[in-house]
Amino acid sequence: MFLIDGPYSSDFLKQTILKFDIPIIETPAARQQLAGLKLNFIDERSARERLNKQPDTLVYTNSENALGWLYDNLPESDLVHTILSVKHKVKFRQILSEQDPQFYFKAYDPLRLKEINPEQIPFPVILKPAVGFFSLGVQQIDSARNWVKALAEIDQTISASQGLYPPGVLDNSSFIIEEVIPGDEFAIDCYFDAAGKVVILNLMQHLFASSAAVNDRVYITSGRLVEQNLPRIQNYLNSLGGLFKLSNFPAHIEIRINNNQLNVIEINPLRFGGWCSTPDIAQYVWDMNIYEVLINKHEPDWQTLVRSNPDKTYALVVLDNSTGHSGREIKSFNYKALLKQVSTPLELRKTNYQKFPVFGFLMCSVPADDPSELYALLHSDLMEYITT
């Protein structure tokens, strides 16, 4: 069954729910997100009883906002226990320490961060909320000299992000410092079946403007990229599934690969890429509806898929607000000018940038041998598109 919540439900997701008559838990948020549609709703009481009696029921959410319903209605369940083990960064790292006891991480109250002697920190490190989303509040700090500056920016982020998402999604009351994981970063949409075996549904590489960048901006995929990385990523995720006891469990997982060494950054529970982003681009790349694959518990034929379109690279461009201006200060964003920057736009999704720190999501394709359009957007602060 699906648990639908804000801030966004795509038309593609809605069409899929209608086409396959997917059971939806009838929460007020789901009613609002899916208004006007005749759906297979399950009232909250019946959904709660079913999940208690059939704990192996597969639950998918389009948004981590929906996790609050599970926390409130199934607080003692194995499902909620598993969600918290991966969602809370400190618990997550504690479990992973069984595999890598030398990995450095520590948790702090934000008020205590200023008391830390930076000379005792093994830079470079990542500083981020213990419960986070969308790279909000995440910073890479490379030296003791930059520590004070980073703390000041954290204060601004806490203030700006207050109230954007529920505490179960983004919580600035606790921060974690952890060592930097080097290597190329990949984002994977997948699910773990009833036996705990991972089934990969989409695989994208996350590009960064610099080695110190941590924001979301450009994700790419292609047949070659999947073919080169699928086997080792599949093997690694199976080991994670065993460690965290994942079964009947959808997830969006971020890992890094450095000289054939794989390390997980985070496991996002019961969902794929946020704002219906990475799951929906799969329809353009692979001509595949991964929601359909999930509900039918099938497995993609990757040997065939990777050969279906060898001449193109597909990209998801997250138009995060990197302008230095808050959404309230921005009068307009020139989406028409943006679309002229890519030769083959596939879909542009605009967002309420005055409320959320993102202007929208652009799905596009570029020639496999010429990604220059993507790198121009990767390095842009997007100032050229706004009017203040």
Image (cartoon, rainbow, N blue to C red):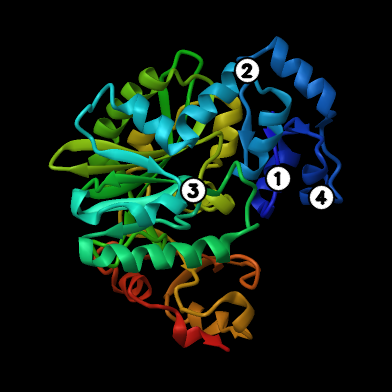
Residue at position x 44%, y 62% from top?
154
Residue at mark 1 to residue at mark 2: CA–CA distance? 21 Å
Q: Earlier in the sequence, mark 3 or mark 2?
A: 2
336 w.r.t. 157: above or below: below
Q: Earlier in the sequence, mark 2 or mark 4?
A: 4
| Disc 2 residue type (three-letter) | Ser
Residue at mark 4 to residue at mark 1: CA–CA distance? 8 Å
Horizontal relation, residue 269 to residue 77: left or right:
left
Whether residue 220 appears in this view of the structure is no
Residue 344: x and y in percent read 45, 70
Mark nearest the camera among 2 and 4 is: 2
Residue at position x 45%, y 79% from top?
382
Q: Which residue carries the number 4 mark? A: 32
Q: Earlier in the sequence, mark 4 or mark 3?
A: 4
Which quarter of the image is occupied by the N terminus? top right
Horizontal relation, residue 50 to residue 147: left or right:
right
The residue closer to the viewer here, 201 or 30, is 30
Q: Which mark is residue 5?
A: 1
Which quarter of the image is occupied by the C terminus? bottom right
Q: Residue furthest left?
A: 259
- Circles 3 and 2: CB atoms closer than 8 Å: no
Within 10 angstroms of label 2, few (less than 14), some, or many (20 or more) residues? some
Residue at mark 3 to residue at mark 2: CA–CA distance? 32 Å
Q: Which residue carries the number 2 mark? A: 77
Residue at mark 3 to residue at mark 1: CA–CA distance? 21 Å
Q: Which residue carries the number 3 mark? A: 282
